[in-house]
């Protein structure tokens, strides 16, 4: 894209030496034997000289580097990934290397870059962003001989999707052979959703420079350079006073003065002020009137269409014949409104903005409507024309509503839900025909699901209140409404919404789907009204089922999960899991990336396996989830959840160091999409639990305080039981009274009929806390723990219960109980528990072999404090 040349070609830019020197140093670092990438950000008001600085940076870098450059435009702010496409246009045109450049996620990133037709399903926005970051890294490595420099001017007008990509790229640049140079106006000039991205770029930049106005001395020097040495300092001072040191306005005035010199005299300052007024704001636009109606209409049409659009389309929009277009174009170039070329290219954004503002309001709306029609006739997609439709006044036009709905579907398919939301919100203002309003609200709710659960709830509720949805769409809207409510930590409302819909739906697959969702969201609630009653109703409904349909499999999955939490015998629970799966894997339609039922059901199957000691089954399921999400490019909340679940399996195996790594990765992924989400609570709870198992109490405390882990808890179940983990943290910190209170609160699990001693081991920890102060209560807790463990029957549960009983037993009885605990845990996948049991047995009996074996196991599993305890005992 052509950009405005510096006002003083070939000469040094005045008072910009430090800014250009910084760019020279960055290019030097990029061109070293071991390249060092980076990010430079130049900011400043309109006309302050950002474009001139970037032009010099490009020219200097082009001597040694491959430079890709573009300038954002107000007309393309609403076009997703427009800036990304413009920056990579030359690389995307290289058909020989295109496949290698796009990499494994061509199907995901191809539509965003305009290379392939979007599919029918929404793309994961985070996945598209990550794929673009990976593409950028590949592009940088392809240009090692001449390192890659990306230059973006007027970034405040870039589309939000491209800015999100650049903001995600920023922290990685130091490790890539790539230099990114960005210029933008103060962030208040950017769209609201783009401001955080600009701030993130500034934070990641190796240098952030705010350009200042030129000094009076610089203005005087430029005046002499442009007008000759005869220009006196008084004229230079008058020019500076009139322009405030704005380089753009100063250059415009000097260009005018070269054409029409001022007569020396006392009136010179007044003449300069009048001339200065003509190059800015509405006075600049008034100059178009002097050029004639054709030039004005062509300029107006060009401003509406935006940069990069062929001038012939601007002429068609303005109603000009080819001959009249040529004349008007020549006049606009002479008047320094347009640059030479076949596409719309204003000489400066200030000119483009002033011309657009000068278009009569009624004509501007007409032009936007016709522009959308022209672009569609030229073969552009509905999404390309949609930015113009957003500016058309509402007029109850069914065709416009349908165009906007098609554009929204295309935006979703390329991973741009914010753009889809804008189109559908505009469609509602048209408004749509009465029978379609529910459909538009439904589509709008689905579009906002990943970005604004609160908006999703509002629109889906409206869709369900309006007529027009058939039974299938009503069930889908209800299901997604419950998902949004759950995502927004409103589990009770999620449960009630599907319960009401199930009660009013005719028997059949749709009703079973809603009933399953009702049971699921009730099970997810932290404080349920009648947990045992719900379990009985679920058992009555699910126990006879064979698992022949997905509705039956969903109910069987919930039955297995509920049985695991209640501590039913693990073999019975495993049998329900078998019936819920198809050869050990999620059935078609119930898979990790299937959206009709959601990913919760395979999650629950895997969680159930993890807590009944079937960890190989759980690991296979969660490994498949990670692969499915990575292959499909789902790198947002779904991938974060999959990593969290894999971390849970590693924690259950006692591979504590690996579990910590995986859980921290889950948190990193989750942090990119928001805060306070269910996955945050689960990952933090598991990570605190893992750090405590490693003996890193101070790290666990810092994490809990930084993440707000502790009461009050959300109205959603946390994996595993959060009060039990928090009570254990307080015990480790020596805050015994608080720990006892927290563990007593955890006993609410038992009141709900949930007696799994591994999921919520509060009885073991509470018994240990009460051993000295209330030994009788401690022994009672231990006895009940043993009963629960024997009912549940897993080696882990039995070993933990016997270990607790041994810790409270008289010295003579303890060794035998410790030995039985070791025997059970040798059959358990929970190797950290086995290490703890061996060390306890060694300490109780003085058996150095058990201490040594416990030490080796604790060391390999990352249980650092336990290993140190065994080492000290051996010493």
Image: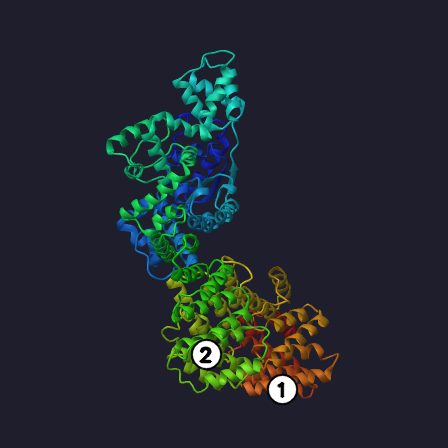
Relative side of 483 to 549, left or right: right
Q: Residue at x 51, y 18 (%)?
A: 270
Residue 7 circle label: none
Q: Residue at x 41, y 29 (%)?
A: 6
Question: Mark 2 and 1 residues: CB-CB less than 8 Å, in contact?
Answer: no
Q: Nearer the viewer, residue 234 or 89?
A: 234
The image position of residue 632, as x and y in percent, is 37, 63
Mark 1: secondary structure: helix
Q: Residue furthest right?
A: 773
Q: Is residue 213 above or below residue 836?
A: above
User: Marks 2 and 1: which is nearer the front?
Assistant: 2
How many marks are shown on the rendered structure? 2
The image position of residue 820, as x and y in percent, is 59, 86
Q: Residue at x 56, y 83 (%)?
A: 533
Q: Nearer the viewer, residue 730 or 81?
A: 81
Which image quarter holds the C terminus?
Answer: bottom right
Q: Is residue 858 above or below residue 419?
A: below
Q: Which residue is mark 2?
A: 557
Q: Nearer the viewer, residue 869 or 422?
A: 422
Q: Is residue 78 above or below residue 579?
A: above
Question: Quarter of the image holding residue 587?
Answer: bottom left
Question: Quarter of the image holding residue 7?
Answer: top left
Q: Which residue is mark 1?
A: 817
Mark 2: secondary structure: helix
Query: Quick check: can you spot residue 348?
Result: yes
Q: Residue at x 54, y 59 (%)?
A: 675
Q: Earlier in the sequence, mark 2 or mark 1?
A: 2
Which image quarter holds the N terminus?
Answer: top left
């Amino acid at each position: 894209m052509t950009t405005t040349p510096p006002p003083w070609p070939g000469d040094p830019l005045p008072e910009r030496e430090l800014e250009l020197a910084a760019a020279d140093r960055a290019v030097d670092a990029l061109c070293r034997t071991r390249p060092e990438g980076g990010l430079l950000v130049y900011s400043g008001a309109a006309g302050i000289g950002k474009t001139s600085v970037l032009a010099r940076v490009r020219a200097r870098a082009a001597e040694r580097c491959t430079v890709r450059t573009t300038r954002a435009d107000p007309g393309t702010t609403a076009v997703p990934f427009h800036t990304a496409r413009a920056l990579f246009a030359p690389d995307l045109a290289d058909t020989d290397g295109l496949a290698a450049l796009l990499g494994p996620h061509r199907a995901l990133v191809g539509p965003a870059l305009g290379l392939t037709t979007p599919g029918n399903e929404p793309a994961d926005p985070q996945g598209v962003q990550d794929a673009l970051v990976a593409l950028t890294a590949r592009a940088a490595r392809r240009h090692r001989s001449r390192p890659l420099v990306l230059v973006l001017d007027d970034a405040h007008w870039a589309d939000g999707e491209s800015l999100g990509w650049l903001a995600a790229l920023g922290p990685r640049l130091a490790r890539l052979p790539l230099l990114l140079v960005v210029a933008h106006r103060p962030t208040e000039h950017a769209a609201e959703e783009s401001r955080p991205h600009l701030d993130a770029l500034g934070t990641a930049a190796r240098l952030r420079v705010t350009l200042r106005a030129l000094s009076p001395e610089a203005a005087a020097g430029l005046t002499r350079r442009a007008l000759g040495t005869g220009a006196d300092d008084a004229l230079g001072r008058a020019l500076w006073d009139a322009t405030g040191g704005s380089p753009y306005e100063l250059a415009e005035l000097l260009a005018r003065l070269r054409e029409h010199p001022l007569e020396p005299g006392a009136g010179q300052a007044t003449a300069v002020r009048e001339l200065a007024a003509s190059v800015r704001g509405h006075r600049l636009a008034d100059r178009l009137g002097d050029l004639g109606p054709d030039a004005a209409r062509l300029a107006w049409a060009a401003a509406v269409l935006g940069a990069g659009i062929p001038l012939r389309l601007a002429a068609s929009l303005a109603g000009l014949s080819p001959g009249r277009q040529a004349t008007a174009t020549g006049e606009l170039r002479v008047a320094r409104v347009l640059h030479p070329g076949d596409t719309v290219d204003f000489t400066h954004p200030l000119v483009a903005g002033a011309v657009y503002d000068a278009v009569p309001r009624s004509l501007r709306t007409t032009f936007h409507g016709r522009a959308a029609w022209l672009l569609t006739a030229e073969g552009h997609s509905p999404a390309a024309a949609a930015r113009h439709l957003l500016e058309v006044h509402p007029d109850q036009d069914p065709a416009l509503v349908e165009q906007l709905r098609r554009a929204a579907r295309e935006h979703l398919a390329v991973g741009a839900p914010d753009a889809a939301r804008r189109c559908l919100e505009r469609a509602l203002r048209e408004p749509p025909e009465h029978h379609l309003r529910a459909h538009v609200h439904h589509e709008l709710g689905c579009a906002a699901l990943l970005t604004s659960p609160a908006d999703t709830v509002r629109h889906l509720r409206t869709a369900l209140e309006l007529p027009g949805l058939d039974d299938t769409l009503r069930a889908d809207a209800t299901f997604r409404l419950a998902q949004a409510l759950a995502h927004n930590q409103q589990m009770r409302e999620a449960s009630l919404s599907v319960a009401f819909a199930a009660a009013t739906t005719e028997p059949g697959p749709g009703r079973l789907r809603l009933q399953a969702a009702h049971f699921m969201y009730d099970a997810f609630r932290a404080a349920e009204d009648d947990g045992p009653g719900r379990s009985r109703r679920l058992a009555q409904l699910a126990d006879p089922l064979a698992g022949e349909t997905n509705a039956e499999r969903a109910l069987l999955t919930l039955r297995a999960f509920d049985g695991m939490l209640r501590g039913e015998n693990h073999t019975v629970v495993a049998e329900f899991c078998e019936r819920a799966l198809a050869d050990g894997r999620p059935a078609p339609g119930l898979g990790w990336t299937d959206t009709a039922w959601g990913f919760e059901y395979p999650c629950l199957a895997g969680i159930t396996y993890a807590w009944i000691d079937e960890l190989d089954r759980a690991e296979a399921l969660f490994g498949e989830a990670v692969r499915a999400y990575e292959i499909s490019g789902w790198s947002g909340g779904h991938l974060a959840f999959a990593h969290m679940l894999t971390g849970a399996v590693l924690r259950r195996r006692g591979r504590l160091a690996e579990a910590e790594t995986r859980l921290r990765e889950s948190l990193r992924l989750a942090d990119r999409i928001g805060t306070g989400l269910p996955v945050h609570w689960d990952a933090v709870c598991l990570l605190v639990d893992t750090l405590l198992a490693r003996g890193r109490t101070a790290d666990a405390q810092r994490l809990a305080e930084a993440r707000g882990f502790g009461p009050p808890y959300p109205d959603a179940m946390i994996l595993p039981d959060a009060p039990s983990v928090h009570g254990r943290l307080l015990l480790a910190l020596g805050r015994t009274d608080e720990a006892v209170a927290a563990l007593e609160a955890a006993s609410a699990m038992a009141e709900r009929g949930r007696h799994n001693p591994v999921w919520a081991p509060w009885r073991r920890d509470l018994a240990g806390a009460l051993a000295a102060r209330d030994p009788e209560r401690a022994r009672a807790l231990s006895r009940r723990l043993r009963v629960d463990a024997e009912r549940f029957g897993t080696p882990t549960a039995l070993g933990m219960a016997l270990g607790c009983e041994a810790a409270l037993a008289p010295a003579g009885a303890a060794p035998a109980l410790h030995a039985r605990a070791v025997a059970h845990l040798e059959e358990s996948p929970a190797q950290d528990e086995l290490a703890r049991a061996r060390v306890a047995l060694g300490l109780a009996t003085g058996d150095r072999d058990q201490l040594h074996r416990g030490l080796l196991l604790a060391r390999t599993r990352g249980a650092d404090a336990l290993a140190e305890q065994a080492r000290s005992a051996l010493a």
